[in-house]
């Protein structure tokens, strides 16, 4: 196979100081000229490997002479007999119109755009496509006048009209960069302009390019960018470095966005927002992704990765930074709850499945398969733990030293931790195992009385994962609160680094109610034998908001676990009903937090708590508990709903909280037949925003309401012309928990707006079906598995990255009971019969062997 190992890293034989690119854009015959200045870096080297894929080579010269001593292979060229220093000039031809993989140069609704991370630049020209080769880029773009915006990285240096009517523009980026940060965009857009004055007084032009007529919908993204720029100055002292920052929104895109130097390219769904088309969640995501890409300017671009095994160096750190930003813009507790849900669902599942890998993987076949929730989100948790251990000031000192040492370099995760250690004169060697060990640590605790106080004994162990048999203890920073139940609390931070260790606490006697993972201070599974009334106590008295929410989650998980164990539904304890009733009747001032406390854990969170996932039992228990809460508190829900009167739409913390709680009430109300249709009909027709309209449809779908389908159809007819809303319709339809969903998916694929080549369209139907419709995806006859597998087979021919991400829910078939596992495995095996992309091949081989 084509596996690459982290430890096989070799520095480049030649480095490149400058590269000059010239593009003559034509849809199916774009000409690319690349002129690079190279210098030998490895003593004695005379040959150089240039990556290249799907390229037609036109000519190749070294120092102006045709070069014939090279070997061309399907994935690149090996140049031989090279001098110490030379100018390399390569002409290639590429076909953007045929590029459905959306890597390299491609067309999105008639606009040219590029995606070069991780290894897309090799689809543009022959080049050492590796992040440790950093060069200064100058880019010339020649195109017809019907493409008024010709953009690339850096600053615009020239614009000429050519004799043949075409236009030639030139851009220069003074900051050396790896080719994965190269970008080119050419199209006809609307432009939204703003500015930002940096802390040292430089004026930066901010420019957003969106489809015609959508200029105003970029306003929120522009303001988010300004807030992110200010945050990075205030919190990290980091200032933007070019005179212009551009963001282009395109509808054909494989991920959320891309941080190309000075020219971000975004999936349009993470730029465009107004009250009529975007929900509160969309606004939140836009602000956080805009910030994420902006923060990459320092953590990723100025200091980049030496090799792709180090991806978490930039991604874990940048996710942590965007989480800090979101927490500062709104409720820190709610942001943390969001992040915890991601870890407890997708990340724990990844660790327990065939694609398990450490945040810094050791072996990679297809790099695109490693843009994972482990590298990103667990990576962010690993950075967060360093922040916790060193404190905010110590962490900032470490960041300062990191930039002081490594600005302009391509470095490793070790370099990052070294800077943290050196700046704080501390030893993080015990902590570093988090970078190399995969799997989810399981932490347990026992409390007992001693002569002088209370002893807390902790144990940790990590089960073997598919990629690593042997596991060792990790350093866990544990934020604890010990409650005596009468209002006395001892709190602090423990560092637990061995398999078992005891900690003594004086001035305490049992009973003591412990919180050990306040703020989810380590990404582990924690078990403790709390009594119901202890959890109820914590749900109201824990100092940490996350711990209060977690206590409620734990109460529900315990109930579901007992129901699964006994094969019959466990009764909801009266104490829990009292707490819930109290919350519904008089919610906390933080309404969004109240909504979280009143919401049961999702199927995925619960599923990760079982070695073998009891699908039906979890679903049935969840269903019954929600139905009980709906019925028991019917009058209170109605009262709450009516008290929370909406104001004209604004995206603000206060209003978002109100909508979240009101729509939580609505979800419960729609489970009860006595609720008059006029209630939700009024909200649907009367509301001035998409958050509340969509909440009605979601509530109808989740309650399997008799009018759900008809309302979906009405929504489609009214809003389906807008692609963002078309996708929302698709997502709702794909989450219908009844067998009609299969016929509806068939129909949705036939709609004029649906396009197999557009990842947003496909994901709205099938990422949602696979990941958010457990009842139908896991239908006992295997129809859900068959459907997803056939979609993946179809998608793989068009876009391997897309197909490879859709397959995730099928990969963990070993987590299910034998009959179901066999059906899932069969679906995967059938898929494997087809000639598959390297992306899917890597995943299926790991899952099936
Ligand atoms: N650094 C980017 C990662 C990325 C990507 C983006 C768009 C399309 C394909 C991609 N492959 C990898 C996005 C980020 O983390 O900011
Ligand atoms: Zn990123």
Image (cartoon, helix red, strand yellow):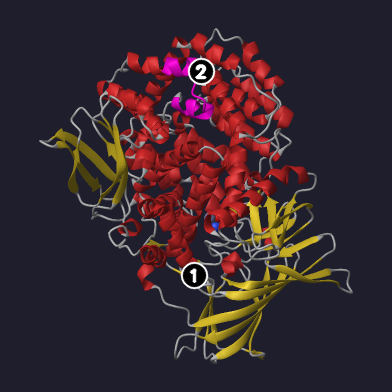
- Which residue is label 2 attached to? 668
- Which residue is label 1 attached to? 404
Give residue 45's position: percent from left, percent from top.
46, 88
Q: Is residue 596 magenta?
A: yes
* Residue 184 in sight from this viewpoint: yes
- Report the residue at 41% width, 39% height from top: 345
Q: Is residue 672 magenta?
A: no
Seen in the image, is 705 located left or right of residue 426? right
- Residue 200: which quarter of the image? bottom right
* Residue 1 in sight from this viewpoint: no
Give residue 799's position: percent from left, percent from top.
57, 53
Position of residue 334 relative to residue 310, above or below, is above
**In the image, farthest residue toward the left:** 451
Depth check: 591 or 414 in front?
591
- Report the residue at 38% width, 29% height from top: 553
- Report the residue at 46% width, 11% height from top: 631
**Mark toward the start of the polypeptide (1 vs 2):** 1
**Chief secondary structure of the magenta portion:** helix
Dot 2: few (<14), some (14–19), or many (≥20) neighbours within 10 Å? many
Depth check: 136 or 788 in front?
136
Q: Closer to us: mark 1 or mark 2?
A: 1
Give residue 499's position: percent from left, percent from top.
19, 49
Give residue 721's position: percent from left, percent from top.
74, 36
Q: Secondary structure at mark 2?
A: helix
- Report the residue at 57% width, 10% height from top: 675
Q: Which residues are magenta?
A: 580-597
Q: Secondary structure at mark 1?
A: helix
- Residue 644: which quarter of the image? top right
């Amino acid at each position: 196979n084509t596996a690459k190992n982290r430890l096989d890293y070799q520095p480049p034989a030649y480095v490149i100081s400058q590269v000059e690119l010239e593009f003559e854009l034509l849809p199916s015959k774009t000409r690319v000229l690349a002129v690079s200045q190279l210098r030998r870096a490895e003593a004695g080297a005379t040959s150089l490997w240039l990556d290249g894929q799907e390229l037609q080579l036109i000519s190749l010269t070294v120092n102006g002479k045709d070069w014939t001593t090279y070997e061309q292979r399907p994935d690149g060229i090996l140049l031989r007999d090279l001098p110490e220093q030379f100018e390399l000039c390569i002409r290639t031809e590429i076909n953007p119109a045929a590029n459905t993989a959306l890597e390299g140069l491609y067309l999105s609704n008639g606009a040219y755009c590029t995606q070069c991370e991780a290894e897309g630049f090799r689809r543009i020209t022959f080049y050492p496509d590796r992040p440790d080769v950093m060069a200064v880029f100058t880019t010339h773009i020649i195109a017809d006048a019907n493409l008024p915006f010709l953009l690339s990285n850096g600053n615009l240096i020239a614009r000429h009209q050519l004799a043949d009517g075409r236009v030639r523009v030139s851009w220069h980026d003074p900051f050396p960069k790896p080719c994965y940060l190269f970008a080119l965009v050419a199209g006809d857009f609307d432009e939204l302009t703003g500015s930002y004055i940096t802390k040292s007084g430089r004026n930066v032009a901010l420019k957003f390019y969106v489809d015609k007529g959508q200029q105003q919908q970029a306003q929120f993204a522009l303001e988010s960018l300004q807030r992110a720029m200010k945050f990075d100055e205030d919190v990290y002292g980091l200032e933007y470095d070019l005179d212009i920052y551009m963001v282009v929104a395109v509808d054909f895109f494989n991920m959320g966005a891309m941080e190309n130097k000075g020219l971000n390219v975004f999936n349009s769904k993470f730029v465009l927002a107004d009250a009529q088309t975007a929900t509160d969640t969309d606004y939140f995501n836009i602000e956080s992704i805009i910030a994420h890409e902006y923060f990459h300017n320092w953590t990723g671009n100025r200091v980049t990765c030496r090799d792709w095994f180090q991806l978490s160096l930039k991604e874990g750190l940048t996710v942590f930074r965007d989480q800090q930003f979101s927490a500062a813009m709104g409720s820190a507790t709610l942001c943390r709850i969001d992040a915890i849900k991601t870890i407890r669902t997708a990340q724990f599942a990844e660790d327990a499945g065939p694609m398990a890998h450490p945040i810094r993987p050791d072996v990679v076949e297809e790099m695109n398969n490693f843009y994972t929730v482990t590298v990103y989100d667990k990576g962010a948790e690993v950075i967060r733990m360093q922040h916790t251990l060193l404190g905010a000031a110590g962490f900032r000192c470490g960041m300062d030293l990191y930039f002081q040492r490594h600005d302009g370099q391509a470095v490793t995760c070790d370099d990052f931790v070294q800077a943290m250690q050196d700046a704080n004169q501390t030893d993080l060697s015990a902590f570093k195992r988090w970078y190399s060990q995969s799997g989810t640590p399981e932490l347990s605790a026992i409390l007992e009385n001693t002569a002088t106080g209370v002893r807390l004994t902790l144990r940790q162990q990590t089960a073997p994962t598919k990629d690593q048999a042997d596991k060792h203890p990790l350093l866990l920073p544990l934020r604890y609160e010990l409650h005596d139940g009468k209002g006395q609390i001892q709190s602090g931070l423990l560092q637990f680094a061995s398999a078992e260790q005891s900690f003594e606490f004086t001035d305490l006697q049992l009973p003591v109610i412990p919180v050990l993972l306040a703020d989810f201070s380590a990404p582990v599974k924690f078990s403790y034998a709390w009594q119901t009334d202890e959890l109820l106590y914590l749900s109201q008295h824990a100092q940490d908001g996350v711990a209060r929410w977690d206590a409620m989650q734990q109460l529900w998980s315990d109930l579901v676990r007992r129901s699964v164990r006994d094969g019959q539904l466990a009764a909801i304890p009266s104490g829990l009903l009292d707490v819930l009733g109290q919350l519904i009747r008089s919610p906390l001032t933080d309404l969004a937090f109240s909504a979280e406390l009143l919401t049961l854990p999702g199927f995925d969170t619960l599923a990760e708590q079982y070695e073998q996932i009891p699908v039906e039992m979890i679903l049935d228990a969840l269903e019954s508990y929600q139905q009980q809460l709906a019925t028991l508190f019917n009058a209170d829900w109605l009262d709450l709903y009516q008290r929370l009167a909406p104001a004209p739409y604004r995206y603000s913390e206060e209003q978002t909280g109100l909508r979240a709680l009101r729509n939580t009430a609505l979800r419960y109300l729609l489970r009860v037949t006595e609720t008059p249709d006029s209630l939700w009909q009024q909200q649907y027709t009367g509301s001035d925003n998409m958050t509340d309209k969509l909440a009605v449809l979601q509530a109808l779908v989740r309650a399997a309401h008799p009018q759900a389908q008809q309302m979906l159809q009405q929504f489609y007819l009214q809003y389906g012309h807008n692609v963002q809303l078309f996708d929302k319709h698709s997502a709702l339809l794909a989450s219908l928990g009844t067998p009609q969903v299969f016929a509806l998916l068939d129909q949705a694929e036939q709609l004029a707006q649906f396009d197999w080549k557009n990842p947003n369209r496909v994901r709205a139907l099938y990422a949602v079906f696979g990941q958010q419709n457990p009842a139908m995806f896991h239908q006992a006859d295997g129809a859900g598995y068959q459907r997803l597998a056939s979609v993946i087979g179809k998608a793989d021919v068009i876009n391997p990255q897309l197909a490879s991400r859709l397959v995730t829910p099928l990969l963990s078939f070993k987590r299910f009971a034998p009959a179901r596992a066999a059906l899932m495995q069969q679906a995967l095996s059938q898929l494997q019969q087809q000639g598959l992309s390297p992306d899917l091949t890597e995943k299926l081989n790991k899952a099936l062997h």
